[in-house]
Image (cartoon, helix red, strand yellow):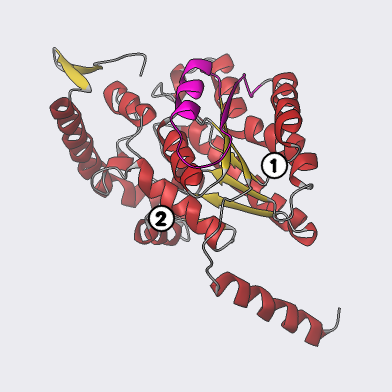
Amino acid sequence: MTGAGVVGTSLAELRRLLTRRTWSGTDRVVVITGGAGGIGSALAARLAGRGASVVVVDRDGERAAAVAAGLPGPGVHTALDGDLTDPAQVEAALAEVDRRHGRVDVLVNNTGMTSAERFGDRSLASIEQEITVNTLSPLYVTRLALPLLRRSVDPRVVTTVSLAGIFPQAETPIYCASKFGLRGAMLSIALDLHAEGVRVGSVLPSATDTPMLRREAVEGGNALQFQGGPPQRPGDVVDAVLSLLDRPRLEAYPRPAESRLVRLSMAFPNLLLTLLPFFAGKGEDGRRAYLEELLHRGEVARDGAGWVLADPTG
């Protein structure tokens, strides 16, 4: 390609990035993994409200069915259960999507887990499990869904990553490793599939008020994520996902100012040991404030000097 051709292509891409249109879900098929969770269920409702047919995929089949049954809009909503860390079960779930719908227009990778157990106490099996859930499973699903995505006139892949995919967290290094890897993989896949029209983007939220965060707060996980004030709500992450559909790009951040601070700090990684202690106390104060909020909401209870979840299965 000539220099003029490169400039023309770049300008066209810039115009596309600056153009925002409301994505219509009418006659679109959306598959959401982790669809029964806090973010997944909120996203399912919003996309169904835009007219999409939503496939809620979750390892908890009962919760997935309940979410699908309560979705609004004219679409045909279904639920599938399965362990998406098992490639055979991924293939089976996608075969069912193929049978029912014949294609996938939007794939949302939204599975994830974390552990408050410190690195020196982790078993090797638990390390492998977290990497598999957070990194390998979205890659399995994306790769195996490609034939169905390629049947769409406007195929999209959106993945929930995390600001932990940019910024290290001492208490949760395996979570960070999994999200650093997932972010890099999705950026690379986006570049690889761009030429064939598959738009791939990621959402990078910070702490979000979900059952996973509530468990982490109770178990004494990473306090740094609470130093930015109250956790964002699942709806904030959903807004970022919808913004990627309305204006496709590589990444979106529910809290842009926070993301800019994180990205700037990573330009000087050798200063982390000096800077982080200044944020640690504020983060612990934020975690305590969040736990007090959860206590007021009836979602945690005091247990001596510690805390427990009011509903351990939630």
Classify 55 as above or below 22. above
Q: CA distance from mark 2 to mark 1?
A: 34 Å
State the residue in front, 85 or 149.
149
Residues in magenta, as a range: 58-85
12 sits left or right of 278 in the view: right
17 sits left or right of 172 in the view: right
| Mark seen at residue 262 | 2
Q: Is residue 92 magenta?
A: no
Q: Is residue 207 visible?
A: no
Q: Three-letter amino acid code at disc 2?
A: Val
Question: Dot 2: what SS?
Answer: helix
Total numbered labels placed on residues in the image: 2
State the residue in front, 24 or 311.
24
State the residue in front, 253 or 288.
253
Q: Quadrant of residue 17?
A: bottom right
Q: Marks 2 and 1: CB-CB under 8 Å? A: no
Residue 184: where, in percent of width, then height?
A: 63, 48
Q: Three-letter amino acid code at disc 1?
A: Val
Question: Dot 1: what SS?
Answer: loop
Of all residues, the one furthest to the bottom in this rendering is 4
Q: Give the mark nearest the N terminus, 2 or 1.
A: 1
Residue that carries the numbered disc 1 in the rendered image = 104
| Residue at x-position 35% and y-position 32% | 210
| Residue at x-position 46% and y-position 34% | 71
